[in-house]
Image (cartoon, rainbow, N blue to C red):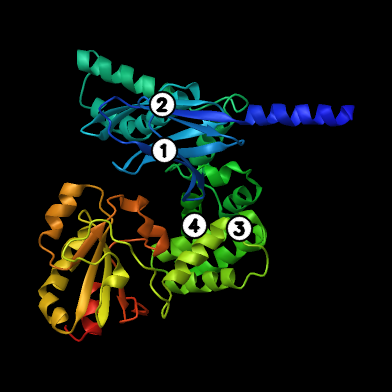
Amino acid sequence: MKKIYILSAVLSAFSLQAQFTVTIQAPAEFKDQDAILYTLNGSKDIIVTKEQNKNNTWTFKYPNHYMGMMKVYFPASNNAVSFVSENKNVSIKMDVQNNKLKDVIYLDEVNDLMSKQQEGSQKKELILPALAQIKEYYKDNTEFGKALKSEIERLAATSNSIDAAQHPFISYYNTNYNKFLSNSTDPAKKVSQDDIVNFLDKSNDMLESSSLLRPVLVSYLNSGGNTNVAGSVDTLLDRLKVETPRGQTVLSELIDIFDAYDMTEFKTKYLTLAKNLKCTITDRLATTLKSNANVEMGAAFPNVKFQSPANTSAKSLYDVKADKKIIVFWSSTCSHCESELPQLLAKYNDLKAKNIQIIGLSLDTDKNSYTQKIAAFPWINDSELRGWNSSYVDTYNVHATPTYFILDANNKIINKPDHVGNVLEYFKLK
């Protein structure tokens, strides 16, 4: 019995040690009440919990050990604060103007250090080369020349070295970012595909929570060349094993990458591989499979409950009755939308005469911009005004704007056009 008590005490102590608190402070004029805490898995934000404003402060208690990127999102105003966790308390103060985030002040040691490190790295990478060029035009004995020389020396001496024992995540992030993602022209610092495979295979759990996974995978694919994409992916997955959590996370990320870059052949191949797995599926891969299944040809398009719809009294997409529906995911800040949607507008009356409804679902964040834009669009419009934090993104597997779907009268997907021209061709209006 005594041993059990001792074990219980040890577990209790570990639990207390593992728990940390995230505290976000805002000025009194900040209007939001709800805030959502996220962790990260690959490139996907994972919801942890939601808290409400108490005296202009949101306090989140995280019960488990976690090292990696985190985010607090304010859905009402679409503000977000990103930070890192090293399994220690996080304290952040927001500066806002007109209910929009203006600045973030990191009050805890870890995030203050990370912020300074990233600022120093950006200056060293972007500003130092420019200053070196400007220096050629000024003499060292002038006041400006002296100031230039001093700043160049200061930036050049900036160190990215971090004590890994004291700050394991910051050290991990900086080391691997500099190794795999920096734009170094030094041949000695070039990494091979084998180097990347070894990193993805041997790295600890901080890989999934670091935000490095997707860009490293893109770098890996680029290093293999356009003619050997399948060979590169097969080599990587053979090493990682798709039955493992790491292998499934990488497989999920690759499917999304191929989707985002319109590499349909490779997306189909590896999505089929994922569908045919007989082992236990991780939540991360299950999410990718579900969002793709939602928008397969012939699938029933998941219903949309409208938020504040324009040009309709319908409460949801399914309430809209038509022989066919054109669904377009777009944004007022999207340059391709700017050129494509007017073409849809030019044929709007022809489509309406055929009992074809257009439903625009916007990934905007700014209400004024969205409102001004839809004033010219007579079709049904709606938006959550949450940008890429919108529920549309995962539900409908949206990776770019504009994205189109054509539905039949029963809301089944009958076509997935790539561009507005394909939409008009489908209805013989081009």
In-front residue for pair 174/105: 105
Q: Earlier in the sequence, mark 3 or mark 4?
A: 4
In-front residue for pair 27/148: 27
Q: Earlier in the sequence, mark 1 or mark 3?
A: 1
Q: Earlier in the sequence, mark 4 or mark 2?
A: 2
Q: For residue 92, which numbered disc appears in the image?
A: 2
Is label 1 in contact with label 4 (beta carbons under 8 Å)? no
Q: Earlier in the sequence, mark 1 or mark 2?
A: 1
- Residue under label 4, please give it: 223
- The extreme bottom residue here reads 428
Q: Which of the two discs, 1 and 4, sits closer to the camera?
A: 1
User: What is the x, y in percent for residue 129?
Assistant: 32, 33
Quadrant of residue 294 within the rendered picture: bottom left
The residue shown at (13%, 75%) is 348
User: What is the x, y in percent for residue 109?
Assistant: 49, 21
Is label 1 in contact with label 2 (beta carbons under 8 Å)? yes
Indicate the secondary structure of the residue bearing disc 4: helix
Indicate the amino acid at tag 3.
Thr
